């Protein structure tokens, strides 16, 4: 975040590439996602989130973003999986990162 605030996008990108999202705490994951959406192309963020999903480590709070990214990058199967998971959870409090952040 600091690297981005100082206009050093390359440094921010390098730091974010090194992060193991699954090892972050809940708070740090919530900080990581908007930064990743700002720095990486949608396909890259989708790939990271899909890896987490396939290993059972995707935070529930990321399901909406994962569904939106899936649609954006043309992955209808994953999009449907995410929305079915959201429907099953019945959790109306799932956080939503604005699609405006999805580049």
Image (spheres, helix red, strand yellow):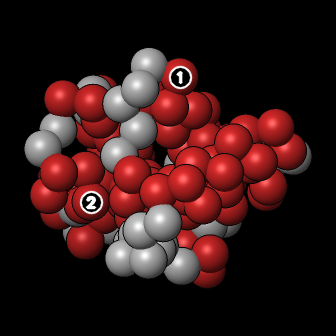
Q: Which residue is mark 2?
A: 30
* In this rendering, position of residue 26 left or right of residue 90: left
Q: Quadrant of residue 6?
A: bottom left
Q: Which residue is mark 1?
A: 54
Mark linked to residue 42: none
Whether residue 17 can be seen here: no
Identify the residue shown where x is 74% and y is 49%: 79
Instruction: Using a 10 Å C-alpha cutoff, classify the residue at mark 2 as few (fewer than 14 neighbours), some (14 to 19) or many (20 or more).
Output: some
Q: Position of residue 91 (x, y in %)?
A: 42, 68
In this picture, is 48 found above or below 31?
A: above
Residues 103 and 25: in front is 25
* In this rendering, position of residue 20 left or right of residue 25: right
Q: Is the N terminus in the top left, top right, bottom left or bottom right quadrant? A: bottom left
Q: Secondary structure at mark 1?
A: helix
* In this rendering, position of residue 23 left or right of residue 103: left
Q: Is the C terminus in the top left, top right, bottom left or bottom right quadrant? A: bottom right
Which one is closest to the eye, mark 1 or mark 2? 1
In this picture, is 52 found above or below 79?
A: above
* In this rendering, position of residue 14 left or right of residue 73: left
Q: Position of residue 76 (x, y in %)?
A: 85, 44
């Amino acid at each position: 975040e600091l690297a981005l605030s100082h206009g050093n996008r390359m440094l921010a990108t390098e730091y974010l590439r090194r992060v193991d999202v699954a090892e972050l705490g809940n708070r740090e994951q919530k900080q990581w996602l908007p930064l990743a959406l700002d720095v990486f192309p949608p396909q890259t963020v989708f790939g990271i989130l899909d890896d987490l999903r396939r290993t059972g480590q995707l935070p529930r709070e990321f399901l909406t973003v994962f569904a939106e990214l899936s649609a954006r990058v043309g992955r209808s199967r994953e999009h449907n999986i995410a929305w079915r998971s959201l429907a099953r959870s019945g959790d109306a409090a799932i956080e939503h990162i604005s699609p405006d952040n999805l580049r």
